[in-house]
Structure formats: structure tokens, C-alpha cells
Image (cartoon, grey):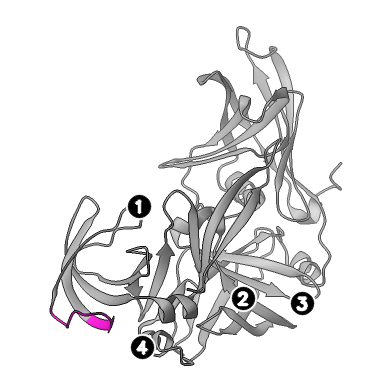
Amino acid sequence: MRWMVVTVAILGVARPARAELWASSMGNLLKDANRVEVIDVTGVKDRTVTGTVALAVKSSAKPGTAFTMDLGFLPVPKAGERMLVICDYQCPRAVGVERAGAFQMTAQEPMDGAFITPNVVETASLALLAKGQPAPDLCVRGLVELLDDPKSPTFEVKINPANGSGSGTIATHRVNASMTVVWFASETGAIAVKLAGKGAVELVAHKLGRDQAGCFSGRFFPTRPLARTARSLDRALDGIANKQLVATGTLTVPRGAPVPAGKHELRFTVTADGYLELASDLAEGRVSHVQHDPGHFGLGFPTKGGAPNDPELFVDFGIDLYAGYEHGAALAKAVRMVGKATVYWYTGGKKAPLGEVTLAYLPERATPRAR
């Protein structure tokens, strides 16, 4: 069984927490799996999926055999969709819904995280990979979304479907490439492509389509390091990235709040490696709490002298934002989208509003050097 458990230090808290992640390459998972089936989904109730076997890649079942399975915490497909199920000693280990002739996969490991690289597999490659044989490369193309530059560069890479490694080009750069998973958002099935020259840039997309040439394509956002212009994207690929001040604002707190009344400056910076930090008299340091709820994207920061999350200064944007973006890039995108946020003070599990703040976005071309 060729899989591994990766121990990860979770950054952004006062004392690093640790979590274990189950990880496998797509090739190893399919080769070592004891059950690989493509299912025509006919019904879904709670977490249980019913349907019929459409393709028995590794299975004692035959096409047309009835199928029923509880997917646990894995994403549940809809009736009428086609789903890939992979089992090893954990069943299911991973599932994915077919889109444009490929399955975008999400894996699970009970009580821990899990991911597969690459997390996209073409239907036509399943039988080959399950036998340990080479399969055609994945062609991936993308448009790179730059917040402060109207010129969006494009990239194209060829990815080994068994291990996620590859190479390609972006603008004038020839790069090595890898297709992986945003580990803190692995359950979303985030598509992450890492391009590496002297330095490296991680690009993230929510989903991929298929273009006329047969390549997978999508709109990608550079999340680590944060690159907001073509120039900073070039510099990141050359191994040069700087800390950036991306937003500032002044929160005016009324009397009677659990913090001193008056004006409090907030300064948000993104480090060279993409992490978000806050400087304020109310709270300071690296983001320690990220929350994605319908209609809400929230960021919590540790307070001086307190535990990582108690008390906590919490900034809530009233928007839906994709969970796969690194926190610094997510903050920059949120401020560009709405600019306003509600600020709360959390202590002892109780939430107290401090007021609304309007944040000024500082474009990269006008950004002063972060202090």
C-alpha cells in the first residue's frame, strides 16, 4: 500500500498545532485500490447514494449492478450525475463527479485530512492507471487573474496523470509544474497548479472546463505568493517576492464596547510567502481563524496577551469567497470586492460587535513598502 501520512504544522497561530494528512498519488491509489467503479447516480438521500455501476474498473460487480453507499463526509453528487468511487482499506477513500470527461476527486481519512495528487483523472485513463500503466498527460491551460493588472497572462502545462508532475510555459517563462491540492481546502476539490522557475507561484481554480483543443482550462488566481501584476508574477517566478501592505482602515468603536472607545487603525499585510498579518492596537499577528459560511467570509486575529483565539478580533465580510485561496490573497480579493466589513470582539465564546470599517485597498503599483 503506497500512501503516506504527512504531519503538518498549521501556521498562523501563536503555538503551532499539528494535524496529520493522508496523501497518495493518483497512480498509486488506483493501482493499489481494491474497488474502482464509475456509477450512474439515480438517487441521493442524506449522505447515501444509490445508482448503477456504469464502469467496473476494479470490481466484482458488472455494469448495471445496483449500487448503494454512504459517502460519509465526502461531497455528495446529484441524481443524474456520474460518480467515480475509489476504495482501499477505507471505503470510500475518494469520490468525484464527472465533468467534461474527467473526475475532480476528493479524498477522506476519518478524523484527519486527505488528498490525492493530481486530484483530476480522465475517464479514459482509469483502466490504464489501475493496471500501473502510463496514461496520456493531462493538458491544463489557464488565465491568471491579476487584481491590479488588466493584462492577464496565460499558461499551459502537461501533467503526468499518475503523479501530478510536469512542465510548461507561462508568459515568457519555461517552468516545472505540479498539480496538487490546497490542503486546508481539500474537501472543496480545489485545483492547484504550482509553477516553478527559480521561485514558484501557486495558482488556484475552483473548477476546470474543457477547451476546443481538449485541454482542461480555467481561471486561476495566484495565491502564494500574492501576485497582483504581471511584474510581480515575473518576480515571483524569479524567486523574488516582497511583503505587501494591501489594505488599511480606521475602526471607530463606540462607548460601552469591550475595547477602548475611539479610533483604531487596522493595517493588513501579506508576507512574501502569502500569509496574512494584521497590525493594530487591538490585535496583531498572523491570521489565526478563517471562517467560510454562506454569505460570510471571516478572519480572526490574536489579541495582545491573549490566547490565539480568546480574545479575538474578527473581521467579517458579507460575501461568499472561495475557500481554496490562501488567506492573504483572499483578503486582497475581499477588499477589492466590497471594501466594507463588520468587526467583532470574541471573548469567552461571546460575540460583541465593535462597528463597521471601510478598508482602503492599496493597489500593488501604489503600495508603499510594508513596515
Q: Secondary structure at mark 2?
A: strand
Question: Which residue is identified by label 3?
Answer: 197
- 4 or 3: mark nearer the eye: 4
Q: Residue at x 48, y 80 (%)?
A: 27
Say which amino acid is labelled 2.
Ser
Say which amino acid is labelled 3.
Gly
Residue 297 drawn at (x, y percent): 51, 41
Q: Which mark is residue 127?
A: 4
Q: Residue at x 44, y 83 (%)?
A: 211
Q: Nearer the viewer, residue 100 or 37?
A: 37
- 3 or 2: mark nearer the eye: 2
Figure disc tally = 4
Placement of 153 over or under 78, stated as above or below: below
Question: Which residue is identified by label 1?
Answer: 73
Q: Compare marks 3 and 2 and give the one earlier in the sequence.
A: 2
Disc 1/disc 2 C-alpha distance (Å): 27 Å
